[in-house]
Amino acid sequence: MLLGDIMTPNVPLLKAGATLQEAVKLLRRSKLDVLPVIDEEGRLAGIFTKANLMDAFLAGATPDERITPHYQRRVETVRVDTPYETLEEMVKTSPVGTGVVVDGDNNVVGIFTKVDMIMSLFRKTEALAAQLKTVYDSMHNGVIVVDGETKIQLLNQPAAKILHLDHGDVLGKPFASVFPGVDLEPVIAKSQWLIGLKAHWNGAAVMCNISPLVAEGEVQGAIVIFQPLTELDQIASELETTKSLSETLSAVLNIAYEAIILVNEEASISLVNEAACRFFRKREEELLGRPIEEVMPNSRLPRTLKTGLGEVNEVQVIDGQPCIVSRSPIVRHGRVIGAVGKITYQRLEEVRELSEKLAEMDRELDYYRAKVQEARKLVTFHQIVTVNKRMKRIKEEAEMVARSTSTVMLTGESGTGKELFAEAIHNASPRRKGPFVQVNCAAIPEPLAESELFGYAPGAFTGAQREGKPGKFLLANGGTLFLDEIGDMPYNLQAKLLRFLEDQSVTPVGGTKSVQVDVRIITATNQDLWRKVEAGEFRRDLYYRLNVINFQLVPLRERPEDILPLAYLFLENYNEAFGMRIEEIAPEARNALLAHSWPGNVRELRNVMERAVNYASGPVLELEDLPYYLQEGNLPAGSAAAGVKTAFPRKGPLDRETVLQVLRKCGGNKSQAAKALGISRSWLYEKLRQYDLL
């Protein structure tokens, strides 16, 4: 499409010697706001606008006065054969609302206004909508679109044919009632992509890809693209089907107005649409396979790969241009295998003012929103972050036994998350609607321990409340009682606990009547309880009753792969709680976190991250934001550069011999050398250039 297709043609021309009265008549007759002005030889001399007319009369001009001193000599001209894409860029950047259209000989052939552009956009939108419907119905694959409540909004013709369904019978119905076996909750609630799922719907075996449907920065539903598989070729065609779905996805992505980029686990670009190529001004083959940070240095897709957390409708400046960016992890079998980013970079002027107003409101609301969400949320197994195989196994087994009423004992060092596991077990159990009551056995004075646990009757002892007091067992009725630090329970109280486990009844102190209660017991300890049994400090029979199911939680030093995921999780939490915008942890700080032995386990790591967020002064959490004992630590044994002590955690003096020594120790690997020196790779390169070592 060229400018000539959308301009206003056949506009009347105003001669430079015309009077103001003639200009008025011509403007009224043409119903235009601007007229081209030509000289005696027919060449373009300028433009005369309604504003020029009003200015002339305000200055005291008469209708018979000529327009010569009043028309504008400076005029924007555009060639009639200007391509539509070039015109789009000109409209975005030009402050002028009207241009004069000329041919190759500089003769006036029409005018072009932003209204013309808007009308062309309307026509283009209608054409795209018609094209999209044609694409949907002409695709070989079935397409189903659902809204945010998972109600079916669209079923294309191939989908109806494959599944032997009528559009009128399924539109508006819940997805799960028509297509069972596929959970759309991760897609709509968490903005995840589900790739390569197999399902059996209405007698047809299909393979499908499911992606979130985003509108106005919010997930509004999901789109399901599927292809049938026959019983005979189901296994043999799986690879070909995946390829076909990928090609279909690419076709759908290329219809999108936004730039879309997919990266793999290594943060290398694996797919881009045509809009992304236009945005980066590169061909597809120039982008594929390259690390995303080479193409876009401030990309947050690597962070999405690390944390598995998506972001929707974030304002980000890319190459000096404000954009609206969304990121989502791609998850398969519970593992992040890639990430997808969407960049809206065109036609942003109309939302800029609104974005600025909303940004200030968001900053004010961030703190309060975080507090409300924190008060409402329950601890679940999903919130226990780990990639360690042993801990993942413990999570799976704990979630499995949560369904029963058996007693559970959680053992492990202080700070490993025993309380978190206890709450998660309760919230995954049929008792989740009942109370979760926690008692720290080490914190209760021994004389008060019995009355605290079992309660007391009215007037049981001097100073007691007149109406008596229910104990923790009664308060936990219908739910779970969590006895933390069970190893510190007084020996004489252990017999009463054993008796409760036998008959599920309690007798308050000073009372004569027992009360039947329904309570599940979960205990925790950081001590070697069996050693206390052998020393006669803990009842053997009670030990066996409490230790029906035992989970030994792994200390953080034995699962170093969890350190950074947990650190990023805490960073995200404290960003939200404190209204901060810390986007990354510097390599030197990450090294320090990995090098520490974490005697305080996850609790210590959480406290370190809270302290660091308070000290941080920019978008990157630096080494100096960490406590001093972490800044001065060594690299962990067994790491690639473990043989070199991190002697320079800050940017201090670094002599040539030290740099050479570390480079030799690391086999010339500059990334490892930078880690060993406790500095960034860019600063290492500065030193290499300074010492002529490059």
Image: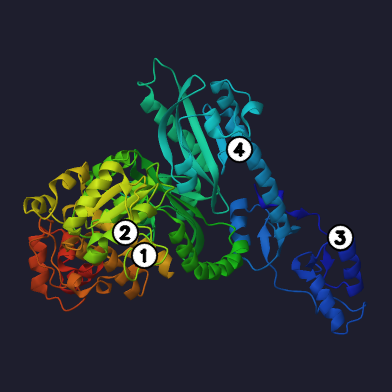
Q: Earlier in the sequence, mark 4 or mark 1?
A: 4
Asked if the residues shown at circle 4 and circle 2 are in contact, with their CB atoms under 8 angstroms apart, the answer is: no
Which is nearer the eye, 131 or 606?
606
- What number is the disc on residue 459? 1
Which is nearer the eye, 94 or 180?
180
Asked if the residues shown at circle 1 and circle 2 are in contact, with their CB atoms under 8 angstroms apart, the answer is: yes
Q: Residue at x 56, y 26 (%)?
A: 159
Q: Where residue 72 appears, x then y in whole percent?
A: 75, 74
- Give the mark toward the camera: 2 or 3: 2
- From the viewer's perspective, tell me whether residue 400 is left or right of residue 628: right
Asked if the residues shown at circle 4 and circle 1 are in contact, with their CB atoms under 8 angstroms apart, the answer is: no
- Residue 670 visible in the shown view: no
- What number is the disc on residue 132? 4
**Residue, disc 3:** 30
Q: CA distance from mark 1 to mark 3?
A: 100 Å
Q: CA distance from mark 1 to mark 2?
A: 8 Å
**Residue, disc 2:** 510
Amino acid at circle 2:
Gly
Q: Earlier in the sequence, mark 1 or mark 2?
A: 1
Q: Earlier in the sequence, mark 2 or mark 3?
A: 3
Packing grade of label 2 (10 A; few <14, some 14-19, many >=20) is some
Q: Earlier in the sequence, mark 1 or mark 3?
A: 3
